[in-house]
C-alpha cells in the first residue's frame, strides 16, 4: 500500500472520528417543529404535510411528550378508503428517535437502518420514565446531515488534492 493511500485512510478515519463529535443538538431544528396530536384525522395531517412539504411529523400528547410518529407512507395506505381515521390509529407507535446528545453519525445510521425509510428523526428527552418515549425537543433531517457530511468530504478532498499536488509532478485541478 502506498504512503499516499495510507495517509488517506488515516485522514478518513480521523475525519469520521471528528464527525462523531458533532452532536444532534448542533444540527437539529428545535423551535418550529410541526407536530400533530393523535385525535386529528389523517386527511387533516395529509393536507398539512403537503402544505409544509414534509414527509412525517411527531405525534405528541397534551404535555408535549412524543407518543408516536406519522409518515406520508402510513397515511397513503388509508387515505382513499379511510380518510377520517385518527392519526393515533395509524401512527408508528415505537418509531426510531434520537437524543440531543447523540452524535450525528449514529442518528444518520438510525435513519438508514429504519425499516420505515425515514428521512427525519424526532429528537426527544428520554428523562421521562413514565412513557416509552419522551418530551419532544426537536427534529433532525437526513438532508441536513448529508449537507454536513458533504461539506466535510469536500474539505477533505481539497486537502488531499493540495497534499497530492505538493508531493507529485502531476497537478489535479478542482
Image (tube, grey):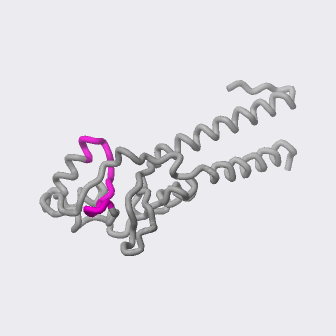
- Along the horizontal axis of the image, is 58 left or right of 83? right
Name the residue at 29% across, 61% down: 60
Q: Nearer the viewer, residue 116 or 51?
A: 51
Q: Residue furthest bottom?
A: 130
Residue 166, magenta (yes or no): no
The reply to whether residue 79 is in sight is yes
Residue at the image point whose x is 43% and y is 64% from the top = 96
Q: How many numbered circles are shown?
A: 0
- Residue 61 vs 31, above or below: the answer is below
Query: What residue is at 52 percent from the left and 52 percent from the top?
Result: 24
Residue 18 percent across, percent down from the top left: 68, 49
Q: Residue at x 37, y 69 (%)?
A: 94
Question: Where does the image place residue 46, in percent across and percent down from the top left?
Answer: 22, 51
Locate the C terminus by quadrant.
top right
Residue sitting nearer the eye, 48 or 162? 48
Left-right relation of 40 to 122: left
- What percent of the width, then of the height, locates residue 111? 47, 57
Residue 58 located within the stretch drawn in magenta: yes
Q: Would residue 119 be visible to someone looking at this image?
A: no
| Span highlighted in magenta in the image | 49-64
Q: Is residue 157 left or right of residue 108?
A: right
Tell me where residue 126 appears, x and y as whole percent: 45, 66
Amino acid at each position: 500500500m502506498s504512503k499516499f493511500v495510507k495517509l488517506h485512510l488515516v485522514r478518513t478515519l480521523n475525519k469520521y472520528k471528528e464527525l462523531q463529535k458533532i452532536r444532534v443538538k448542533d444540527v437539529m431544528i428545535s423551535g418550529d417543529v410541526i407536530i400533530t396530536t393523535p385525535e386529528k384525522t389523517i386527511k387533516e395531517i395529509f393536507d398539512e404535510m403537503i402544505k409544509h412539504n414534509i414527509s412525517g411529523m411527531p405525534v405528541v400528547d397534551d404535555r408535549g411528550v412524543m407518543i408516536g410518529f406519522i409518515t406520508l407512507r402510513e397515511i397513503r395506505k388509508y387515505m382513499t378508503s379511510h380518510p377520517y381515521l385518527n392519526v393515533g390509529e395509524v401512527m408508528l407507535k415505537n418509531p426510531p428517535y434520537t437524543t440531543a446528545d447523540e452524535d450525528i453519525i449514529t442518528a444518520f445510521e438510525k435513519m438508514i437502518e429504519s425499516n420505515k425509510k425515514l428521512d427525519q428523526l424526532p429528537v426527544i428527552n428520554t428523562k421521562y420514565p413514565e412513557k416509552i418515549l419522551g418530551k419532544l425537543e426537536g427534529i433532525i433531517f437526513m438532508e441536513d446531515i448529508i449537507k454536513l457530511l458533504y461539506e466535510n468530504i469536500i474539505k477533505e478532498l481539497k486537502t488531499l488534492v493540495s497534499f497530492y499536488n505538493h508531493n507529485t509532478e502531476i497537478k489535479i485541478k478542482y
